[in-house]
Image: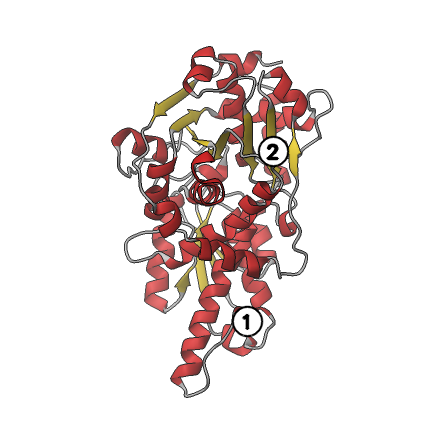
Amino acid sequence: MFSFFDRSEIDIVRYTPKKGNAHSTVLTPRDFADAAKEIKAWNNYTPTPLLRLTSLASELNVKDILYKDEGPRFGLGSFKALGGAYAALKILRREIDKKQTAIGLAGGVTLEDVREGRFAKEASNITLVSATDGNHGRSLAWGCHRFGAPCRIYIHAEVSEGRATAMRKLGATVIRIKGDYDASVRLARLEAEKNGWFVVSDTSWEGYTDPPRDVMAGYGVMVGEIAENLKMPPTHVFLQGGVGGLAASVCAAFRQYWGDSCPRVIIVEPDRAACLFESAKAGETKTVKIERETVMAGLSCGEPSDMAWSILKEEAQDFMTITDEVVVPTLRLLKSPVGTDPVVEAGESAVAGLAATILASRREELRDALEMDGNSVIVVVGSEGITDPAVHAELMKEADHA
């Protein structure tokens, strides 16, 4: 069953976190609480499942594996639904409030006012933009559609047409560029500055921190749902990398919830886009050039978020890379599960943490290094469902003929 995983390559950097309080100052308890209050008031909010992969855990000789399935989130197929739309709402409230005050009207515009369409005319004159590999842009497009704001999404050459179509159906103007994800981020920033638009990004840079903070605060809703389902903290959490926003949010929220009892954090990235792995090796943020796109499209990021790194450098203990070849076997393992485990239909970026869990648990030296044993309770974030059925089907078909 696991012979393929046993042959696959894996790399790891053992990292000594730098003690600090970024977990509560970069993302404060108030940030998380405000986001949770707002998002839980949205129509059709419901917690996503926290699935127990008990049979798989037994096969891997650990106590439990908990899979947070974000596929059902708001019908958008991804945890990103929690971030982009919330950050968009915060920007719209701020800008509408400024304009109301500037023309001598009473300020005090609330998130509820914008959410309920009380300033629909004003929102229609505020354009929001972002770059995306797919899921973040879909969340922003969905939020703009709900709140009545124009939306422009920049995608790179390798983003599938299916993901572009999903954003267009939500009313977004989609602009495809020839470069990679990081090039699309730069273009979105440039055109926003030229035209007086507002960037809603999940990555931060110098002078740009509020929207990425709001995006990460939104992700805290997911973390709260995990924590509220557990009587005791897990021992390990394997987290996808990307620019680092998801991982940093989970780290900060777990630290705030469990203090010194929070789980050991292992960051997992594709070896083709390992900017956090390289940052851990260097002890500072490092940008990597993506020579070839990974099938884990949502993790194809060459430049870390400065804000995310400020948290990860204090909380993460290990950084791992995995190869693309483990993606399909992990997808199949979820779709045709071990024993009595539930069936899960996951997207390509969803399985990085679970794949790394399997790889590490079957290598004695890694088990020892990560302090994994029969008492380990491991959390992984299934960050997306099948967000592009055509890409997913083609990937599975190619693997069958490999």
Q: Name the foreground residue: 73 vs 299.
A: 73
Residue at (62%, 16%) from the top-left corner?
59
Picture quadrant where residue 358 is located:
top right
Picture quadrant where residue 300 is located:
top left
Residue at (44%, 16%) from the top-left corner?
366
Q: Quadrant of the N terminus?
A: top right
Up-down relation of residue 158 to residue 39 (above or below): above
Q: Please indicate, yes or no, whether residue 124 appears anywhere in the rendered image.
A: no
Q: Which residue is mark 1?
A: 114
Kindly state the secondary structure of the residue where label 1 is placed.
helix
Picture quadrant where residue 339 is located:
top right
How many residues crowd around disc 1 within 10 Å: few (fewer than 14), some, or many (20 or more)? Answer: many
Residue at (58%, 14%) from the top-left corner?
2
Q: Quadrant of the C terminus?
A: top right
Q: Which residue is mark 2?
A: 67
Amino acid tagged 2: Tyr
